[in-house]
Amino acid sequence: MTTKSGATMSADNKKQQPATITAQALGWVEETTRSVTPPIYPSTTFERNADLSYHDGRCYTRTDNPTYDQACAVLDALEGGAQTRLFASGMAAAVALLHALSPGDHVVAPRVMYWALRSFMLDSGVRAGLTFDFVDNGDTADWVSHIKPGKTKMVWLETPANPDWQITDIAAVADAAHKAGAIVAVDNTVATPLLTRPIELGADIVMHSATKYLNGHSDVLAGTLTTANKDSEFWQRVCKQHAGGGGVLGVFEAWLLLRGMRTLSIRVERASVNAMAIARHFENHPEVAQVQYPGLESHIGHDIAKRQMNGGFGGMMSIRVKGGGARAVDFHNQCKLFKRATSLGGVESLIEHRSSVEGPTSPVPDDLLRLSVGIEDINDLIHDIETALDLSK
């Protein structure tokens, strides 16, 4: 089978498992040179034929660059989607969905979620005429009670939700949203399509901050949207926003994104195993007030997580230390392997005091530390946390 960009690919890739899809990047081979590693096409424009048509439908790089094709196809295969668009950042992808709405439209979203997007909703979203209700992420009844037939146009889910890792029942909320005529969009950044496939659970659109797990090396800023129905009116508005708004991904970044996705399976698996081991080790630690991780039976959303997360519970967790905010800051200052940095999903472990990052209106407790667990040796990671807890007493 030959792709639009002239690469050959296996005809049976839909039968392959995610680990094979990612490692092989669908098995595409560039036709001219038989290159296994995909090429980069830096051209911003493409020559017309004499009759003013385009050679292979490509006009201008914003939407037509062939460097995008393979990364989009891999995400379509992983998410079970019909079409993917690449954006300059996760925020650009999420904002494109909000821009596709109309003044007066109602959106239901989690009370605890990615802080930058929540802030955008309450600022630019409100000024654009949108209305919002924010609900308890893990309470299906709360979601259903705020979804208003004929008024609610989008239900935005984030699960596991940053930074308390609450779990939303995607299937139940999607069912209620569709009965009310609303679009369901799911931020799948933390779970990744290796652990959760929201489209199979009823989602219409899946979003990723591809800066995080999809790329996985903390060296690319990117975002993605994948739709279940590329012909829907709403998706067509999103595509117009993508092309017209200009927030598209650079071709080198698209190439790096695909490079990163080829190790997605082993990175997510290792991070999930490490996070579970850390969660279990510190769950009853005398210096720890609470470990928030959906893989623990003590987590309020564990039963739902077991239903809709397959193969692990991800690499994200939070620890609430005893002694309050000052002790939490001191503890995270004492960590050596866990680097004090924003972001998540890379091969290296990170730690962050979220309430100080989000500011005085943050709902995050000041004793909470968010951990992005990497792929290092688990004994070294546990030792780093133990040592930091001891030094911060």
Image (spheres, rainbow, N blue to C red):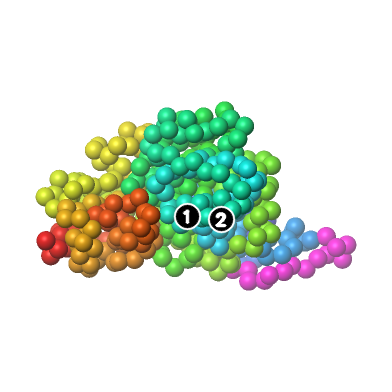
Q: Which mark is residue 208?
A: none
Q: Amino acid at mark 1?
A: Ser
- Work out which quarter of the rendered image holds the C terminus and state it: bottom left
**In the image, residue 99 above or below residue 52:** above
Q: Secondary structure at mark 1?
A: helix
**Mark pair 2, 1: CA separation:** 8 Å
Rendered location of residue 145, percent (x, y): 47, 30
Q: Which residue is mark 2?
A: 124
Rendered location of residue 196, percent (x, y): 43, 42
Residues rendered magenta in the picture: 39-53
Q: Amino acid at mark 2?
A: Ser
Q: Does any portion of residue 384 appear in the rendered image?
A: no
Rendered location of residue 379, percent (x, y): 18, 58
Q: Residue at x 24, y 54 (%)?
A: 367
Foreground pick, 388 / 41: 388
**For residue 298: magenta?**
no
Q: Residue at x 36, y 34 (%)?
A: 304
Q: Which residue is mark 1?
A: 119
Q: Secondary structure at mark 2?
A: helix
